[in-house]
Amino acid sequence: MSQAQPTAEQNPNLRKKQKTALKNLTFTGYLEGTSFLLLLCIAMPLKYMMGISEGVKYIGMAHGILFIAYIMILIVAAIKIKMPLWAIPAGVLGSFLPFGPFIFDHFLKKSLKKSVKKEA
């Protein structure tokens, strides 16, 4: 009989830390991306079309905090997961573009899946 390939559960320390780092990055990226879309699509039109600037004040502040958190978590996750070289610049660039964090997350997970298959 052939032996089964090792699974993530057989190496719980490293894999669990990697999964946790990736989950944190994904969650923060979704929050940051959503706050950016809210800022662009709701708060800024309210300010410039209707003169209501409170949305930009509060959503902008939340987006700024989430942006800084996202960059910090991206750097920590890059170290823990051992991301490819393109990942950090792509993650930073993605945070400046609408829908960027969502697209970055998709390509990062796709790349990590390929690298895990190569190792197995």
Image (cartoon, rainbow, N blue to C red):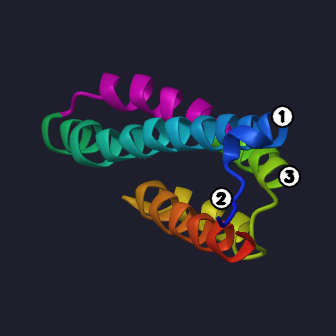
- The question of residue 9 being in magenta is answered with no
Q: Are marks 1 and 3 in contact (CB under 8 Å)?
A: no
Query: Does residue 112 appear in this view?
Result: yes
Residue drawn at (68%, 60%) of the image? 5
Which mark is nearer the camera, 1 or 3?
A: 1
Q: In the rendered view, would you say 84 is above or below 49?
A: below
The part of the chain drawn in magenta is 51-69
**Alpha carbon distance from label 2 to label 3:** 29 Å
Q: How far across and how far down the image is residue 27, in percent?
A: 51, 36
Residue 79 marker: 3
In the image, 118 versus 39, the foreground residue is 118
Which quadrant: the C terminus?
bottom right
Circle 1 packing at 10 Å, graded few (<14), some (14-19), many (20+), is few
Label 3: which secondary element:
helix
Query: Does residue 67 appear in this view?
Result: no
Label 1: which secondary element:
helix
Residue 4 marker: 2
Q: In the rendered view, would you say 64 is above or below 88?
A: above
Query: How would you classify the magenta stretch by its main secondary structure?
Result: helix
Which mark is nearer the camera, 2 or 3?
A: 2
**Alpha carbon distance from label 2 to label 1:** 20 Å
Sooner in the amino-acid sequence: mark 2 or mark 1: 2
Q: In the rendered view, would you say 61 is above or below 119?
A: above
Circle 3 packing at 10 Å, graded few (<14), some (14-19), many (20+), is few
Q: How far across and how far down the image is residue 36, in percent?
A: 40, 45
The picture quadrant where one finds residue 35 is top left
Number of numbered discs visible in the structure rendering: 3
Which quadrant: the N terminus?
bottom right
Sooner in the amino-acid sequence: mark 1 or mark 3: 1
Q: Is residue 46 left or right of residue 89?
A: left
